[in-house]
Image (cartoon, rainbow, N blue to C red):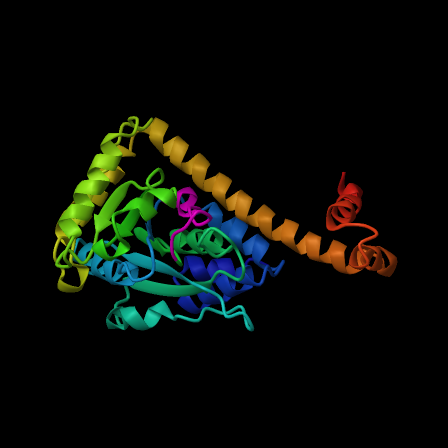
């Protein structure tokens, strides 16, 4: 046991891929290796990128890879794809969009499927972060599936959360409805050449101005980029570095790490609860109980209470 961890600490990328795959399958054999690796981490800076489909998340991530590599930083990407309903595998394959970095030893890209997890992330996202952190990557970028009312888990895993918007998203009301302005550390209006981008940026700045000052004292900036043309990426990178510096005091480091541990624990517990629920429903719900619900002599709430009473 622990052989994969030893190989990963020596820089073996295949071993890293195997361990992350085990973690995605919730293979019990992964636990010891992940525990070993966790004790070697705590150094990477984590960036979350979220936003609606079509906002350019992969394009921005790709541009940030290039910029951080020019600064001498190594970068790992966790690109979370929606799951195939049949195989539970990643269906978009974000790695294809970043193939120009495939020969760079300072870059590693891993696609992961949500596998039914809510929050826009894979349940094993925290495990992948643990692996890449222990491998010594300086920057870890997490790209989510999308953004919505249930897809704000990215804040728990990230030191800096980038919320992408475009003028194509309308007047910005959807961004506020989604409840993500509260978790954004930087807001980026991408595809700035699109008509209405400046208006969207003003709308977002005004919306932020009307909100109470954040507890950490960070003033959320609204930036404009054209990531496909590498426009505005220098400013975005500089602002990320400022965010890292802002978080560098001991008190803020402790808050960030506590939040990251809580997010990881919540994801692990969620997987266990879903697995337990499936076992309870499949194994402990008797045919008679099922039939009573189907015939409406009972109801799902009563059956659920009966099943989970066994856990109390």
Is 133 placed left or right of 5 in the picture? Answer: left
Corner quadrant of residue 58: bottom left
Above or below, comparing residue 100 to residue 273 in the picture: below
> Residue at the location (18% across, 45% down)?
201
* Residue farthest toward the right in the current orientation of the protein: 288
Using the image as rendered, state which of residue 290 and residue 119 is in the foreground.
290
Is 300 placed left or right of 25 in the picture? Answer: right
Using the image as rendered, state which of residue 153 and residue 142 is in the foreground.
153
> Residue at the location (25% across, 36% down)?
207
Magenta-tinted stretch:
146-158
Using the image as rendered, state which of residue 204 and residue 260 is in the foreground.
204
Q: Position of residue 32 (x, y in %)?
A: 58, 53
Q: Position of residue 89 (x, y in %)?
A: 50, 70
Tell me if residue 12 can be seen.
Answer: no
Above or below, comparing residue 54 to residue 254 in the picture: below
Using the image as rendered, state which of residue 248 and residue 294 is in the foreground.
294
**Numbered marks: total:** 0
């Amino acid at each position: 046991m622990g052989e994969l961890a030893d190989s990963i600490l020596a820089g073996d990328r295949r071993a890293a891929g195997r361990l992350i795959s085990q973690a995605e399958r919730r293979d019990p054999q992964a636990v010891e290796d992940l525990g070993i690796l966790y004790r070697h981490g705590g150094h990477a800076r984590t960036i979350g990128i979220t936003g609606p489909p079509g906002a350019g998340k992969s394009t921005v991530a790709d541009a940030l890879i290039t910029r951080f590599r020019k600064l001498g930083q190594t970068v790992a990407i966790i690109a979370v794809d929606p799951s195939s309903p049949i195989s539970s595998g990643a269906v978009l394959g974000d790695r294809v969009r970043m193939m120009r970095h495939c020969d760079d030893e300072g870059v590693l890209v891993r696609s992961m499927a949500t596998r039914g997890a809510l929050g826009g992330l894979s349940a094993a996202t925290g495990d992948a972060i643990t692996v890449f952190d222990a491998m010594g990557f300086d920057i870890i970028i997490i790209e989510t599936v999308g953004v919505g009312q249930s897809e704000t888990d990215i804040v728990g895993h990230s030191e800096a959360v980038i919320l992408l918007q475009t003028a194509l998203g309308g007047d910005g009301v959807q961004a506020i409805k989604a409840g993500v302005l509260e978790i954004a550390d930087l807001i980026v209006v991408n595809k700035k050449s699109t008509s209405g981008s400046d208006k969207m940026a003003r709308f977002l700045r005004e919306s932020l101005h009307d909100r109470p000052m954040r507890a950490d004292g960070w003033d959320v900036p609204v930036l404009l980029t054209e990531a496909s043309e590498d426009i505005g990426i220098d400013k975005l990178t500089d602002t990320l570095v400022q965010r890292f510096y802002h978080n560098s005091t001991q008190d803020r480091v402790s808050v960030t790490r506590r939040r990251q541990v809580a997010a990881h624990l919540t994801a692990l517990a969620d997987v266990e609860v879903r697995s337990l629920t499936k076992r309870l429903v499949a194994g402990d719900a008797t045919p008679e109980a099922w039939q009573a619900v189907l015939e409406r002599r009972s109801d799902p709430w009563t059956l659920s209470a009966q099943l989970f009473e066994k856990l109390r």
